[in-house]
Amino acid sequence: MPFGEGFRLALQAIFAHKLRSFFTLLGVIVSVAFLVATVAVIQGMNAYVRENLAGAIVGSNAFQVRRTPIAAGLIDDETIRELERRPIIDRKDAEYVRRALPDAQAIALQSGWPTPMSDVHWRNRTVGDALVFGVTAPYQVVQDYRFVAGEPLTDVDVAQRRYVAVLGWDIADKLFGQEEKAIGHQIRVSGLTLTIKGVTAKKGSVLGQSFDGFVMTPLTTFESVYGRRRTTVISIKMEEASAIEGAMARAQEAMRISRRLRPGEADDFTVDKADALVGFWISLTKVLFTVIPAVVAIGIIVGGIVIMNIMLMTVQERTREIGIRKSLGATRRDILHQFMAESVTLALMGGALGVLLGWGLAGVVGLVSPLPARLTLWSVSLALLLGATVGVAFGVYPASRAARLDPIVALRNE
């Protein structure tokens, strides 16, 4: 039997029993939709972290010298206790790094974890839970901050411990409505009166966490209120991404000299770049990818068993038709191909409907939540392949049973 003829007969049989066919495919549809939607959300998040989040936290073409690694969540309790015994990063360390990297575009110190939060007051308006951190002037270059109003912090602000601040876009918008109006006004933060010097351009948010809800002060001013943080960070920005690896090696050597570490002694600091954050996130999503196949496999198997049962029932219902076809010259292979084509077509339709449903679910997730979604070709191809595989695997037995029917016995069936 030609493939086209088998496909046409399969479609006729499916559409002759639309409701039954739909409920037959429900398990396959739901499983495939879950696969496509989940993979779309995870892939979208991975791309977002790679393209936006890592750069927003670490900076583009940048790396950091830190007391603890970015991916601290991946280590055990004993290692965490060991990390907590490390000495803090200080200005002496930063000076060694600066001398080792004369070609760096910017080298900055910033206050680290735990980052304090505070209400920000202006007249009768208040914005709660703003992040407050202190920096040296080059930090604004490392983070690629653009200013929509005013000007950035300067080295003089840091040296003279001036009571000035730069606001993130969200804070300025909530307090003043227009960013330009914020410049020159005084705000109250943690008991300090700070004069607003600049407002940064909007960077956006991820998972509801804004990158623009901060008050940035000179590091010396910050330390006069909050003291030294336990994880002061050195941030280094290079002109080109290709220069980062070599610069990281030189920074590591400079830190070992600053700390007077002997050959063979382990580093008591960490040199990290954005890849560490991306790798940390992707390692978390791998956990989901280990669970997804099990969930999808259960649904596919259940759906396949339903397809097999319906196909067996179909063979029983069409026994007389099979007898007539055999008496007119149809071979066992023709009957086998006919029912296999029907089973595969049924499963492929389930896969296609599941892809459409999964695509729609991923779009809805992207609209109603901060989770981005990105449909990938490999997940769609895998979904359709699963459908075809289910059709073949669970259609063989019903099709072979139909092909083995004796035509005389089949013709006697009422």
Image (spheres, grey):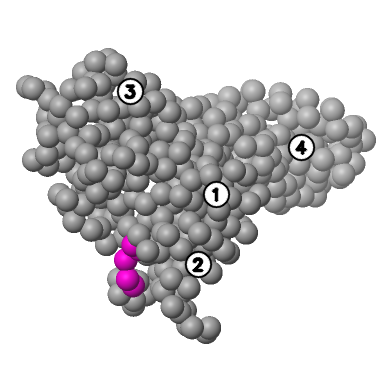
Question: Would residue 81 be found to the left or right of residue 46 on screen?
Answer: left
**Other-residue count near label 4 (Cα within 10 Å), few / some / many at <14 / 14–19 / ≥20:** many
Per the model, the C-alpha gap separating discs 3 and 2 is 36 Å
Check whether the beta carbons of the residues at disc 1 and disc 3 lie within 8 A of each other: no
Q: Decide: marks 3, 2 in contact (CB < 8 A)?
A: no
Q: What residue appears at the point 59 percent right and 43 percent down from the top-left corner?
A: 239
Determine which residue is flagged by label 4.
341
Residue drawn at (48%, 45%) of the image: 106
Amino acid type at image mark 2: Ala
Q: Residue at x 64, y 23 (%)?
A: 15
Q: Are marks 4 and 1 in contact (CB under 8 Å)?
A: no
CA distance for labels 4 and 1: 65 Å
Identify the disc placed on residue 254.
2
Q: Is residue 276 magenta?
A: no
- Magenta part of the protein: which range? 86-90
Q: Is residue 327 left or right of residue 201?
A: right
Alpha carbons under labels 4 and 2: distance apart: 69 Å
Q: Is residue 269 left or right of residue 15?
A: left
Circles 1 and 2 in contact, beta carbons < 8 Å: no
Q: Nearer the N terminus, badge 1 or badge 3?
A: 1
| Nearer to us: label 4 or label 2 | 2
Disc 3 target residue = 150
**Crowd tier of the residue under label 3, counting other residues whose Cα lies within 10 Å: few below 14, some 14–19, many 20 or above:** some
Q: Amino acid at mark 4?
A: Ala
Residue in view at x 55 percent, y 34 percent: 374
Give the main secondary structure, helix, strand or loop, of the magenta stretch.
Answer: loop
- Which element type, helix, strand or loop, lies under badge 1? loop
Q: Amino acid at mark 1?
A: Ala
Q: Earlier in the sequence, mark 1 or mark 2?
A: 1
Reading the chain from its start, which is encountered first: label 4 or label 2? 2
Rendered image: mark on residue 414: none
Q: With 203 as the anchor, is 194 left or right in this view? A: left
